[in-house]
Image (cartoon, helix red, strand yellow):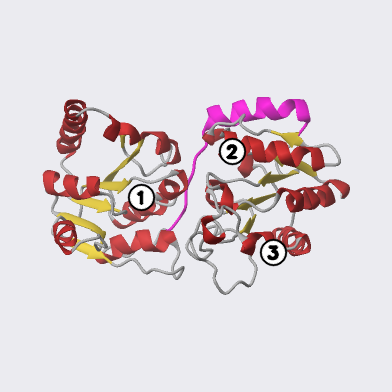
Amino acid sequence: MFERALVIKLRHHGDVLLTAPVFSALAAAQPGIEVDALVYHDTREMLDLHPQVCRIHTISRDWRKLGPLAQLARYWRLYRTLKSRRYDLIVHLTDHWHGARFARLLRPRVSVAPAGTKSSALANRVWNRSFSALFPVLPGNRRHTIEMHLDALRRVGIQPADKTLTFVAGAEAEASLAAKLSPHALAPGRYVLVHPTSRWMFKAWPAGKMAELINVLLGRGERVVLSAAPSAEERAWITGLIPRLRGAYVDLTGQLTLKELGALIAGAKVLIGVDSLPIHLAGAVRTPVVALFGPSGDIEWAPWQVPHRIVTSPFACRPCGRAGCGDSQISDCLTAIPVSQVLAAVDALLVEAGR
């Protein structure tokens, strides 16, 4: 039995959200255990209201930009905080060296991480010897990311029974979202949410095709809500989309916090999106999803345990994991997807979900 565990995931928002089942599985398998998280500071909202997360420790992404003394001071403070928790289990879910350092410094009874795939034999030896157990990561779009996370627990003798993906927006976010939706008379379960962009824009479907799809939905009388992050790239993409739309829609681009976005997704009858955080939020809040996938792996990153449709095109080279064909930022496997295929997926999913 373990009394206190630390789960480390130093990646982007969607990656951190997909660690949520690890906390649920640990709590179910080890009654009374306290499970903490160590994540980048800007991703903490993915877990901060999770009922099985005890404490969240954070580290800044910009620590490398600091001088050596400032780096050491921050590291020392974090180390002292973590040391005081006396973890007997560390679950490190990436190949980040922070996890290896803390496994050595904190000396838990058990520590587990992915087997090293470093660039040199020496680095691999150092990495592998930092942990008491290692789990394999299958390459090539063969296993869902959540199952790979749970493999860490399986490796140390914990068979996960609870694989629930959890995200809690919270009452404050729900109230602030309701205030933003009130002028538009939008009720939960009465709108289609389209989140067509990603942090990596080579994952986006062409704006002309997305506009054609939205116009069909508007012509049917659907209430359509647009959302996107406030980044310059995503705002520019939406700016190029809007002149092509015919009919009334609601544009919330750049106006939502991550918690509000989760609440907005929870109220949608269906989410139409790409391989990005929103499709994982949809899985966590049980909203049906139509997800377009191009160069990224649809098995690794599919919506989790929620009615969904994955839309791809039959290119033998996908998923290649590249930033567009030849790293051009344009993915032929996405541009080739016809509007009719996406529309058919939306219609089938709405029937399946009874919406």
Residue 190's spot in the image, x, y percent?
Answer: 75, 43
Instruction: Please state the extent of the stretch shown in magenta in the rendering.
Output: 163-186
The CA distance from mark 2 to mark 1 is 34 Å
- Give the number of the mark in front: 1 or 3: 3
Using the rendered view, name the quadrant where residue 1 is placed.
Answer: bottom left
- 332 or 33, which is in the foreground? 332
Residue 49's spot in the image, x, y percent?
Answer: 43, 37
Say above or below: 327 vs 262: below
Q: Which amino acid does label 3 sit on?
A: Ala
On the image, numbered disc 2 is attached to which residue? 233
Which dot marks residue 336? 3
- 102 or 315, which is in the foreground? 315
Helix, strand or loop at label 1? It is helix
N-term mark: 3 or 2: 2
- 197 or 56, which is in the foreground? 197
On the image, numbered disc 1 is attached to which residue? 23
N-term mark: 2 or 1: 1
**Does residue 184 belong to the magenta stretch?**
yes
Say above or below: 253 vs 114: above
The residue sitting at the bottom extreme is: 316
